[in-house]
Image (tube, grey):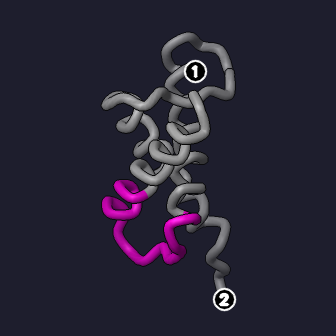
Amino acid sequence: MNIIAWIVLGLLAGAIAKAIVPGRQGGGWVSTMVLGVVGAFIGGTLHTVIQTGTLQLTAPGLSIPGVFIAVLGAIIAIFLYGLLSHSNT
């Protein structure tokens, strides 16, 4: 997948995930794009593990199922970022 498709998939997945997850995540469009691209890798890797049983770092393509997988991965990324960034003080 070329870099333009990665950016489009990242923006789309990150924006949808931020709209789904309650609370305020902060950040601008760059953080949304990065969150979406990281989410695409998380979702694509989990999809590959479930489908084939092998661990490979993959990302879904720019399609409806690919966006769905990327959004699920971005939701996981938001959750993990929230766990890591908030202190218990």
Location of mark 1 (residue): 49
Q: Residues within 10 Å of mark 2 (few under 14, many from 20)?
A: few
Quarter holding the N terminus is top right
Nearest the camera: 23 or 5?
5
Residue 79 pos. (x, y %):
51, 59
**18 in the magenta segment:** yes
In the picture, the disc for residue 81 is none
Residue 43 pos. (x, y %):
51, 36
Quarter holding the C terminus is bottom right
Location of residue 30 (image quadrant): bottom right
Q: Residue at x 62, y 77 (%)?
A: 86
Q: Secondary structure at mark 1?
A: helix
40 shown above or below 12: above
Q: Residues within 10 Å of mark 1 (few under 14, many from 20)?
A: some
Location of mark 2 (residue): 89
Q: Residue at x 50, y 67 (%)?
A: 29
Location of residue 35 (image quadrant): bottom right
Q: Is residue 81 left or right of residue 22?
A: right
Q: Residue at x 55, y 53 (%)?
A: 77
**76 in the magenta segment:** no
Q: Secondary structure at mark 2?
A: loop
Amino acid type, residue under disc 1 in the picture: Val
Q: CA distance from mark 2 to mark 1?
A: 37 Å
Q: Earlier in the sequence, mark 2 or mark 1?
A: 1
Nearest the camera: 40 or 88?
40
